[in-house]
Image (tube, grey):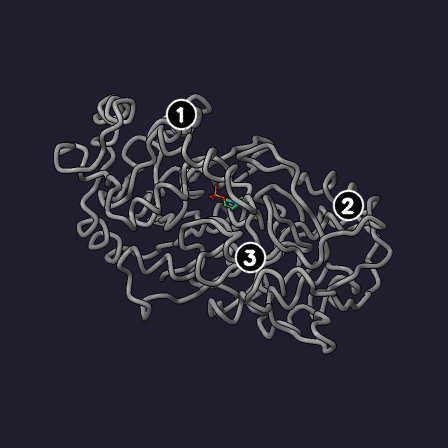
Amino acid sequence: MVIVVIGMQWGDEGKGKFIDFLAKDVDWVIRYAGGANAGHTIVYEGQKFALHLLPSGILHKKTKVLLGPGMVIDPEQLQKEIMILEERGIRCEGRIFISDRAHLVLPSYKIQDETSDAKRKFPIGTTKKGIGIAYAKRALRTGIRVADIFELERTEIKNETDIAFIEQHRDFLCSLSINHFLCIDALTKTDKVMFEGAQGTMLDMDIGTYPFVTSGPTALNGVYTCGVPTSSIDEIIGVVKAYTSRVGEGPFPTEFTKDEEGLRTFIQTEGNEVGTTTGRLRRVGHLDIPALRFASKITGITSLSITHVDVLDSLSDIKICIGYEYKGEVIDYVPTATSDQETLTPVFKTIQGWCCDTSTITKWDDMPKEMREYLTIIEDFVGIPIRMVSFGPDRVQTIVKSGFLQEWL
Ligand code: IMP
């Protein structure tokens, strides 16, 4: 059985939490895009783990993880992450593999990322991890893949710091590298395989709010870089946060306004809305249904899973954006030009909050009536059923609708 988990907003939806939850007894978890720009936080038995490059399945003892061919990898960061896990008692040996087709992020890329973004007419506010540069070099065919580290003379790499960096990390990379075909062959013979997306659909180069996006494929398109046939995918889970957040620049129609400062601070604090990678405070706003509907349709998800619902516990009413006013009419899709996205005025529906502590809910039927209504409204507008709900950061604070993924769980 093959499952894909994708972010439906601008990243930080809490994908890592569901991936970790679903990764028990899973043979392989494959991260298919991005690099150390991502930050997946997982809480298990009171311990908090922040992963940037390693797939979120790594916390399960028997699960193997693959850093896929569509990723851009900083070996120094990867080595650090593995060391931290080992120090905290997570045995990683023999469980981590890197596709030999994945590209590397070199030291000069990070410097270039920072300087080039600062020079832009409209800076994107990148994570400065060299991601855009690595993907650009890949497209220009001047990048370096894991398989190329033994034949630098055949590459375009000239910077001495970059060369020394590759030499320093050669043995480490070599110890984890795997021929991509052999890996795909192995994983198609196993029972349970999960693909882990990074960032969110609205940050995708093709589908997202270009140019305020990342450079890797963040939607379903990234799965195909791994060479897995579409027909083998059984479930595509779109992860959505109960409100919206965004890091960096770019249009954000439902962002809290100046009149909503109190709500902004409340959500940022209760939702711990601080970037795992950059430490930047995240921009926050109301749930944006047109953007969610757009992301859901375009990626073809088969179900939705929602996180951070508990953050809304004490609100007496909750506003959901159900459309945008645009050029004198109400639309339910996202226009393409940045200037059009900037002029959208959200149309809200206000629903009654549930006003109770949900952090200890363990059964679907125990959800307060108002919360079930809230979920139904989302399902009706988006046209996709919600199958998992997360009420807090811990693995156990997750409920699954009966019948969902019966063969998997
Ligand atoms: P880059 O991926 O570092 O090039 O950054 C491009 C844009 O994507 C910036 O607005 C970043 O803040 C955003 N971004 C990149 N990775 C993440 C993520 O994991 N979560 C949220 N935003 C991200």
Q: Residues within 10 Å of mark 3 (few under 14, many from 20)?
A: many
Residue 85 sits in which quadrant? top left
Q: CA distance from mark 3 to mark 2?
A: 22 Å
Q: Which residue is mark 3?
A: 239
Q: Earlier in the sequence, mark 3 or mark 2?
A: 3
In this view, the residue in front, 251 or 121, is 121
Residue 271 sits in which quadrant? top right
Q: CA distance from mark 1 to mark 3?
A: 28 Å
Q: Is residue 43 left or right of residue 281?
A: left
In this view, the residue in front, 148 or 128, is 128
The amino acid type found where label 1 is placed reads Lys
- Could you say whether the residue bearing mark 3 is in a helix, strand or loop? strand
Q: Is residue 348 left or right of residue 296?
A: right
Q: Quadrant of the N terminus?
A: bottom left
Residue 189 placement (x, y as % from top left): 23, 57
Who's the residue at 47% across and 34% down the image?
114
- Could you say whether the residue bearing mark 1 is in a helix, strand or loop? helix
Q: Earlier in the sequence, mark 2 or mark 1?
A: 1
Q: Which residue is mark 1?
A: 80
Who's the residue at 78% across and 67% down the image?
348
The amino acid type found where label 3 is placed reads Val
Compared with residue 257, is residue 152 higher up or lower down, i.e. above or below?
above
In this view, the residue in front, 333 or 96, is 333
In this view, the residue in front, 88 or 342, is 342
Q: Is residue 380 in sight in this rendering?
A: no
Who's the residue at 73% across and 47% down the image?
311
